[in-house]
Amino acid sequence: MTNRERVLHALHRKPVDRVPMGFWYHFSPDDDFGQETVDEHIRWYRNSKADFIKVMCDGYFNYPNPCIESIQCADDWFKLKPMGADHPYIRRQIERVKGVVEGVKGECCVFYNVFNPMSLMRFGTSEEQLMAHLKENPEAVCYGFSVIAQDIRSLIDGVLKEAGADGIYYCVQNAETFRFTEEEYKKLVTPYELPLLEYANSLSDNNILHCCGWAGDRNRIEVWKDYPAAAINWAVYVEDMKLEDGRKFFSNDVCVMGGFDNRPGGVLYSGTKEEIKRETKKIIGAAGTVGVVIGADCTIPANMPVEHLHWVKEALEEIGGENQKWNIVQGTIDTKQ
C-alpha cells in the first residue's frame, strides 16, 4: 500500500497492510516563512516517516480583523465584519497548503489545521475579555462568532477546492469543565462551529475532528460526541479515554486517531526503544488495526528525537494489518486462520 492508500483505508475503516501513523509539531507558531515553511512540512514528513501531512497554521493563530481593535465592550461585537475570501490572512494559508500538496505530488494525504470561531476570537483578544463579554452580552459575542465563521468558511473552501487538501483537521476547544456547562456550550458555541465541519464534509469525506485538550484541563467531551467526521482525535490522557473507549463513545463507525501522550513526561518522549515499541503494540492490541491511526493527543515537543517516531513505525510494521492480531498477554503476534 502507498501512504495515501493506507490513510484513506484507515479513515474509512477498511483493511490496511499496517496501521498508519502521523505526528507533528509547531515549526514557527508566530511566523510564516513562505516556501521555507512549505519545505519544512515536507521535510518533517519524510524525516519522521509519517504516512500523511498535517499542515500547521503557524503564523495564523491571531485573527487580524481590524474591527477587533476598536472593541471595548460586548456590544461592539455587533460591528464586526468579515475580512473576506481575498484577505491575505486567508489567501496565504491557502497558498501554504497548495505548496505542500504540489510538493508531495499525490504521495500522501494532506490535511490543514482549522480552528473554530470561538478560538479565533480568543486568540485575537484575550480569554479574560472574551469570557467577560460573553457574560455581559452573549448575543453580541455570538454575532461575532457568526462573522468569524464566514471567514473560516472561506478558508475551508479554498483549502479543499483550490489548494487540493484531502481534508481539514478541525480543532474544537473551549469546552473545559470550568468554562461552560454542557447546555451553555451547546447554546453559545455549537451553532457556530458545527456548521463549518458540516460544510467541510460537503466538500470532502476525509475530515478529521480534533477535540483539543491544549491546556491539560478536562473537557466536557460529550458536547462533541455527535460531530460528524471521518476520524476523531482527542486527548487520551487528559480526558482519560483510551482509543478503544473513544470508539464506543463517539461511534463504532468512526476512525480513531492518537493513543500517545504528547507531553515530555509521556513514554513517546521519555521512553526507551523497547518501551515505545511495547506501548505501540499495547495501543494497537486494544484498539485493533482497522479504523485506527496512531498519533498523539496533540502537537509533540519540537525537540522530540525523531528516532522515537521511527520506533513507533517499526512496531506497527511488526504488527502488520488486519490478518494479524497482537497478543498483549503473550507478547507475540497471532495470525488469524
Image: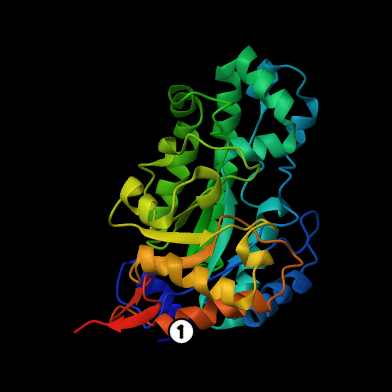
**Is residue 267 toward the left or the right of residue 223 in the image?**
right
Q: Position of residue 265 (x, y in %)?
A: 68, 56
Q: Is residue 106 visible?
A: no
- Quarter of the rendering containing residue 293: bottom left
Question: Which residue shows up at 28% across the image and 82% down it?
Answer: 323
What quarter of the picture does the C terminus occupy?
Answer: bottom left
Which residue does the numbered mark 1 point to in the structure image? 317
> What residue do we see at 38% from left, 70% from top?
328
Pick whichever, 185 or 276, lies toward us. Answer: 276
| Colouring chosen for the image of the structure | rainbow
Q: Residue at x 46, y 57 (%)?
A: 208
Relative to 95, residue 68 above or below: above
Count of residue discs: 1
Q: Position of residue 280 (x, y in %)?
A: 49, 70
Q: Is residue 219 left or right of residue 41?
A: left
**Residue 40: x %, y % from top left:** 73, 74
Q: Which image quadrant for residue 268?
A: bottom right
| Above or below, 146 relative to 262 | above
Q: Residues within 10 Å of mark 1 (few under 14, many from 20)?
A: some
Callout 1, which amino acid? Glu
Location of residue 219 in the rendering, given as x and y in whole percent from the top left corner: 52, 37
In the depicted structure, whether residue 294 falls above or below residue 263: below
The quarter in which the N terminus is drawn is bottom left
Which residue is at the far left?
Answer: 337
SS for dot 1: helix
Is residue 252 visible to us here? Answer: yes
